[in-house]
Image: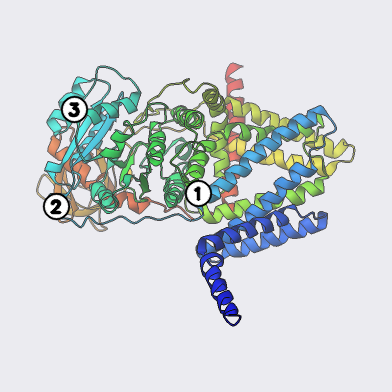
């Protein structure tokens, strides 16, 4: 009996080892707990000035080495880990060592700044969760017979946009590569306009309207859901022109995954937004939205938390009907719809392949108005359907939705960072109860490490320091709407963003720029106080110097931000798109020239002719025919010459038939390769180069404002 005891003990130990200790779930929990304990120790261990300084220098050196080599995704995770540790050490030190203020004014400024820092710290952590490991989903080829392909309804909602904007979208939708008997295009006109009804009838689309405008775009879409029956619904804003391949790229994912309720594709814009146009950065610096569609959405996809963005997306009808249609409780009906689908357990996907292109906002005023609506809507969702609470969401989904909503609360923290140095330079109040040297060794490493880490992660879709400019421009305008939406979610209404306008004369939009002119003036005065403190002060030169550098940085950002209000001329109602297609030019005498396009629009195009061709006989106004080729298909368009030289301009005949207009849309805007060629092609970020760009724009705006003021005063005299 005794001889069997060791055997039984051995069997029991083996069983325990197999079922408990080496159980992968148990092991992961233990490893996670151990990692948290070690992280807490590293964060909380006290270091003196020199030790903390050495820690910061070593961490920054390691980060630079990792950034400079192609370490792949593993290297990025190490960078994120170093950045988080440094940021956590700073926050722990900030809370435990710097809040014993001597004056009530210092306490007010100090605690206010701390709240702004905690907001930034939270967004930093959530941002790392979203972007650390993008899924990079691939499109799924449809491998079933064409006869079995599903039916698709294409919805194009419109309210007050002009027919010239809507026309191309409808015509391009009608040419999507999909069996004709399984594709129906619906023009949803909340403006109830006869010319839209007539155009839809002539073009072959189905016109739907209603006798009210309840719930704006969401109500318009829900009305169409009642009157249609396709298995899938594709939605395009009326200025987003779909590529022919849109459905073949997206539908395959639904056939593979029966729980998939939505596939979103990027919002790609073929015209510059106010930042790009006024700062002359179009296709040079990634615009405000590229980070979201280029990286954040791809990161969300890993957590099954991709957002529906209101356009350029396909949804399965069944799940959409199950949640009651498009959400109507908030003015960001798209994101709220995605949240509802996630709560029901459906999968949401993102495919980072541009399959449509649209018009960006025309001017700064409309851009601000659009962002106010987005910010208000996200605050409404945060208030009435907070992702942290309620059933149906995984932890990853909750964090992704939370970060999307918290992002639009940045207005107040951004303003706090812009005025924080005033505490010392204007009032002599200290926002840190610590020596300046300790502030430097604790605060600078997390700032530099976050910059290096985000530059590595976001380099193709967001350049360093530009987010400061984007957020500064909008901060003043979104702060109050967001706070009001938190208090009363029903405040505010859906506003349509105007598209397709022109700016015939350059002007400075003082009405939009005045908050930043005021802040800029206060910063310049603060610089004067800083100089006076350094020259005549009581010995706190280092404190004054640090606050002076902070103010100088804010001044650069404010100058660049205020420059966005300098509205450049926009004399083309139909923006041109750079693209090279094979083409031929035929004159009335039958002579044909082989050439290629270099740009196009809905009303004309530019042609580059080969060297050696005699162009002296080409005259402005001469009627010609232009042929454009794609996949061995030729489409011919009549027009006339508007300029000549090595490259010539062609203006299309205004009497195009609908068939010719459809062919033009198919041959130009409907070509998916046009947008894919431009997607994510900006130069990879270099923080020093980016700061130089922002500084240059800031300096230019300073000169511009001085000249504007001088000229204005001269006119008054």
Q: Quadrant of residue 67?
A: bottom right
Quadrant where the N terminus is found in the figure: bottom right
Residue under label 1, please give it. Answer: 130
Q: Nearer the viewer, residue 395 or 472?
A: 395
Residue depicted at x 34% and y 56%: 138
- Residue 688: tell me if it is visible: no
Task: From this view, report whether residue 464 is shown above or below residue 492.
Answer: below
Which residue is more in the foreground, 377 or 62?
377
The CA distance from mark 2 to mark 1 is 38 Å
Q: Secondary structure at mark 2?
A: helix
Alpha carbon of mark 2 to alpha carbon of mark 3: how far?
27 Å
Q: Position of residue 288 (x, y in %)?
A: 48, 41
**SS of the residue under disc 1:** helix
Please tell me whether residue 698 is drawn above or below residue 380 in the rendered image: below
Give the residue pinned by disc 2.
Answer: 146
Image side of residue 295 versus residue 12, left or right:
left
Q: Which mark is residue 451?
A: none
Coloring applied to the structure: rainbow
Residue 581 at x, y percent in the picture: 25, 52
- Between marks 2 and 3 in the image, the one whose residue lies nearer the viewer: 2
Q: Which residue is mark 3?
A: 207
First in residue order: circle 2 vs circle 3: 2
Q: Position of residue 456 (x, y in %)?
A: 54, 56
How far apart in space, not on screen, are marks 1 and 3 (Cα)? 40 Å
Residue found 54% across the figure and 26% down from its top: 486
What SS does tag 3 mark? strand
């Amino acid at each position: 009996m005794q001889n069997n005891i060791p055997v039984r003990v051995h069997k029991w130990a083996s069983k325990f080892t197999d079922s408990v200790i080496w159980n992968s779930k148990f092991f992961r929990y233990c490893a996670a707990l151990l990692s948290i304990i070690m992280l807490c120790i590293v964060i909380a261990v006290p270091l003196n000035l020199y030790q903390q300084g050495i820690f910061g220098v070593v961490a920054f050196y390691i980060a630079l080495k990792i950034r400079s080599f192609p370490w792949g995704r593993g290297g990025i995770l190490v960078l994120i880990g170093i950045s988080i540790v440094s940021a956590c050490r700073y926050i722990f030190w900030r809370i435990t060592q710097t809040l014993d203020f001597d004056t009530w004014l210092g306490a007010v400024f100090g605690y206010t700044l701390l709240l702004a820092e905690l907001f930034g710290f939270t967004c930093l952590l959530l941002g790392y969760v979203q972007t650390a490991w993008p899924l990079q989903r691939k499109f799924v080829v449809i491998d079933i017979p064409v006869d079995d392909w599903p039916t698709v309804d294409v919805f194009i909602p419109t309210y007050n946009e002009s027919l010239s904007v809507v026309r191309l979208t409808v015509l391009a939708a009608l040419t999507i590569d999909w069996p004709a008997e399984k594709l129906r295009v619906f023009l949803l006109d909340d403006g109830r306009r006869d010319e839209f009804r007539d155009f839809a009838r002539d073009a072959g689309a189905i016109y739907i309207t209603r006798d009210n405008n309840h719930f704006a775009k969401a109500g318009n879409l829900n009305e169409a859901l009642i009157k249609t029956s396709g298995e899938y619904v594709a939605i395009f804003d009326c200025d987003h022109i779909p590529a022919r391949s849109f459905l073949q790229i997206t539908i395959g994912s639904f056939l593979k995954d029966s729980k998939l309720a939505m596939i979103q594709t990027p919002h790609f814009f073929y015209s510059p937004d106010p930042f790009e146009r006024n700062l002359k950065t179009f296709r040079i610096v990634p615009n405000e939205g590229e980070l979201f569609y280029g990286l954040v959405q791809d990161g969300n996809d890993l957590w099954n938390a991709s957002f529906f963005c209101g356009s350029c997306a396909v949804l399965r009808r069944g799940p959409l009907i199950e949640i009651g249609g498009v959400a109507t409780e908030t003015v960001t009906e798209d994101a709220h719809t995605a949240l509802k689908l996630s709560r029901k357990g459906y999968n949401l996907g993102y495919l980072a392949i541009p399959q449509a292109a649209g018009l960006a906002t025309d001017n700064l005023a409309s851009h601000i108005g659009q962002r106010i609506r987005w910010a208000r809507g996200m605050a409404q969702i945060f208030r009435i359907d907070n992702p942290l609470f309620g059933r149906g969401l995984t932890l990853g989904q909750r964090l992704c939705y939370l970060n999307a909503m918290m992002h639009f609360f940045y207005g107040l923290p951004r303003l706090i960072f812009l005025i924080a140095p005033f505490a010392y330079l204007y009032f002599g109040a200290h926002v840190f109860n610590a020596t300046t040297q300790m502030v430097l060794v604790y605060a600078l490493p997390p700032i530099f490490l976050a910059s290096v880490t985000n530059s590595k992660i976001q380099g193709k879709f967001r350049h360093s320091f530009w987010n400061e400019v984007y957020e500064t421009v909008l901060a003043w305008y979104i702060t109050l709407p967001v706070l009001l939406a938190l208090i009363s979610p029903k405040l505010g209404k859906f506003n349509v963003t105007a598209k397709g306008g022109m700016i015939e004369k350059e002007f400075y939009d003082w009405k939009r720029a005045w908050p930043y002119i005021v802040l800029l003036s206060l910063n310049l005065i603060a610089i004067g106080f800083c100089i006076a403190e350094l020259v005549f002060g009581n010995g706190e030169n280092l404190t004054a110097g640090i606050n002076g550098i902070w103010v100088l940085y804010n001044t650069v950002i404010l100058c660049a931000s205020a420059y966005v209000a300098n509205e450049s001329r926009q004399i083309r109602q139909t923006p041109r798109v750079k693209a090279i297609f094979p083409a031929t030019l035929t004159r009335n005498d039958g002579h044909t020239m082989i050439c290629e396009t270099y740009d196009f629009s809905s009303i004309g195009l530019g042609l580059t002719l080969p060297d050696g061709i005699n162009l002296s006989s080409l005259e402005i106004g001469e009627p010609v025919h232009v042929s454009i080729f794609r996949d061995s298909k030729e489409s011919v368009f009549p027009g006339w010459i508007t300029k000549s030289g090595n490259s010539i301009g062609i203006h299309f005949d205004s009497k195009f038939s609908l068939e010719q207009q459809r062919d033009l849309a198919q041959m130009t805007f409907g070509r998916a390769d046009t947008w894919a060629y431009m997607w994510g092609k900006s130069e990879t970020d270099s923080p020093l180069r980016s700061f130089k760009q922002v500084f240059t724009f800031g300096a230019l705006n300073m000169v511009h404002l001085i000249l504007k003021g001088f000229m204005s005063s001269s006119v008054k005299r």
